């Protein structure tokens, strides 16, 4: 029995490092949701929210935030002092909008949103489609890993293109990004921390050099737009510019790779008729939303409690963390009929896979566009696409995806 739940105390015992859990976390989520939308997860040491209504509401609730040091000191909270071996990583994090709250978050987010206007995103449609066609042209004849040959290159090349980072840098971006996002998993080690720190130092240095180049010769890219904002006044410091570029490059591909791999896997495993989506944009959009509901790539985000408060009958203390289990909300039986079934025609397939509230994914329109373009081209060009072997889930829970997805075309 993976899940042990005590209804009287709402205490949950479930090992997040158990492969039986992270290979199929949905069975455990369903078991918890059948009892309660809220539980104290002993192994995580915090209250966790699994229900759609709860997660959707708390993500918007200003009593909780991603930043805590603006309302309390490290000493008051009993937090460890900053560690020298992660100082480059911490420096990038410290200026990242994802880690900040208003007013800093509002300022950074406004700049990025302005640069992320739908005109700029829409202009990428034909670029993404051309890229997808080129990748399909190069598919091997023998069974091959669709993640390596398709799902990984599309998001990183797209975000590099948007930001104005040379395409030749994409393998290096992937390596830095993998090392940095490993910090957000369960079971962080000293080795993971030092690798992430080295990646953060090298990545920052690279972005600083690129900024210097673009300053001299601006282009029609997001980095040049951000540099212009920095030069027009004190709206964006150089440290913030570097962190923003790194955040966009990392966030811009990690989740999208797995969202695409998970979606293709769901379609193939459930024998869904692919050709329906080739010429029907509305059906394709519904398929993307149902995939994001059914197999979301990001499962958990935390928030600090900013002042003593009460929520769902729980007394929460300032500085304590709560966890919002985004991966569970689409499976909430209070929201959907037959939540355990993959139904591409489901409407609406509600989920919190892009978050909600002030940190709602700024890249959601781009992610949706990438997923729709990549799936349409794949289904059109490869009508006989089938699984070649059983896909193996990644050894991770927060980033929920596959290690490899072997297919034949
Ligand atoms: C399917 C793909 C994606 C998923 C599932 C996803 C999911 C998320 C989620 C859940 C958050 C909120 C985290 C929180 O509330 O703590 C977020 C934030 C963010 N995402 Fe995405 N994302 C995806 C793709 C992208 C892309 C393509 C980009 C960039 C182009 C991007 C950039 C960002 C940024 C910059 C933030 C921080 C926003 C803020 O703090 O205001 N994401 N994403």
Image (cartoon, rainbow, N blue to C red):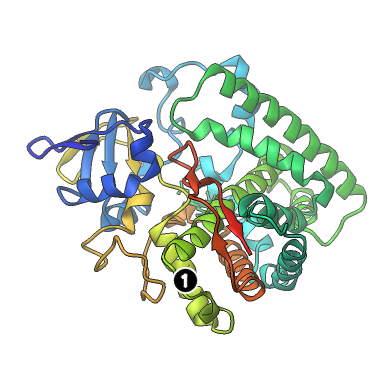
Mark 1 lies on residue: 287
Give the farthest residue toward the right: 216
Tell me the SS state at disc 1: helix
| In front of the other: 117 or 143 | 143
Point out the image quarter for the N terminus: top left
Point out the image quarter for the C terminus: bottom right
Can residue 306 be seen here?
no
| In front of the other: 82 or 390 | 390
Give the farthest residue toward the front: 142
**67 horizontally vs 195: left or right:** left
Residue 112 x, y percent position in the rendering: 64, 56
**Picture residue at 76% right of the left edge, 69% below the top:** 130
**Picture residue at 17% right of the left edge, 51% below the top:** 34
| In front of the other: 333 or 276 | 276
* Vertical position of residue 214 compared to residue 366: above or below: above
* Vertical position of residue 9 compared to residue 123: above or below: above
Give the farthest residue toward the bottom: 279
**379 horizontally vs 262: left or right:** right
Q: Mark 1: is the Cβ under 8 angstroms from ligand 1?
A: no
Q: Residue 294 occupies which quadrant of the picture?
A: bottom left
**Picture residue at 64% right of the left edge, 54% below the top:** 143
């Amino acid at each position: 029995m993976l899940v042990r739940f005590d209804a009287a105390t709402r205490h949950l015992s479930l090992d997040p490092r158990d492969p039986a859990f992270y290979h199929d976390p949905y069975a455990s989520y369903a078991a918890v949701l059948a009892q309660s939308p809220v539980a104290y997860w002993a192994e995580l040491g915090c209250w966790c929210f699994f229900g759609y209504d709860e997660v959707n509401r708390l993500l918007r609730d200003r009593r909780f935030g991603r930043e805590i040091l603006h309302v309390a000191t490290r000493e008051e909270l009993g937090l460890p002092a900053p560690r020298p071996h992660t100082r480059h990583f911490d420096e990038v994090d410290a200026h990242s909008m994802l880690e900040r709250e208003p007013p800093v978050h509002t300022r950074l987010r406004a700049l990025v949103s302005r640069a992320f206007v739908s005109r700029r995103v829409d202009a990428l449609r034909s670029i993404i489609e051309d890229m997808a066609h080129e990748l399909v042209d190069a598919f091997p004849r023998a069974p091959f890993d669709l993640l390596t040959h398709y799902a990984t290159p599309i998001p990183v090349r797209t975000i590099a293109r948007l930001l104005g980072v040379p395409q030749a840098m994409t393998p290096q971006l992937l390596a830095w990004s993998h090392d940095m996002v490993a910090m957000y998993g369960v079971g962080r080690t000293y080795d993971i921390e030092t690798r992430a720190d080295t990646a953060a130092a090298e990545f920052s240095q690279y972005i600083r050099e690129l900024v210097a180049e673009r300053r001299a010769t601006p282009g029609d890219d997001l980095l040049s737009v951000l540099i212009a904002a920095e030069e027009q006044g004190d709206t964006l410091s150089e440290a913030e510019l570097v962190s923003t570029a790194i955040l966009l490059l990392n966030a811009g591909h990690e989740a999208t790779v797995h969202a695409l791999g998970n979606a293709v896997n769901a379609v193939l495993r459930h024998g869904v008729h692919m050709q329906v989506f080739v010429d029907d944009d509305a059906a394709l959009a519904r398929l993307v939303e149902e995939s994001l509901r059914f197999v979301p790539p990001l499962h958990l985000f935390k928030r600090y409690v900013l002042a003593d408060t009460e929520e769902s009958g729980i007394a929460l203390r300032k500085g304590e963390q709560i966890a919002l289990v985004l991966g569970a909300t689409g499976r909430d039986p209070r929201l959907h009929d037959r939540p355990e079934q993959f139904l591409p025609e489901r409407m609406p397939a509600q989920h919190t896979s892009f978050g909600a509230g002030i940190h709602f994914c700024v890249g959601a329109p781009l992610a949706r566009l990438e997923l729709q373009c990549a799936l349409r081209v794949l289904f059109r060009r490869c009508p006989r696409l089938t699984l070649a072997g059983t896909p193996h889930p990644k050894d991770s829970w927060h980033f929920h995806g596959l290690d490899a997805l072997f297919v034949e075309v």
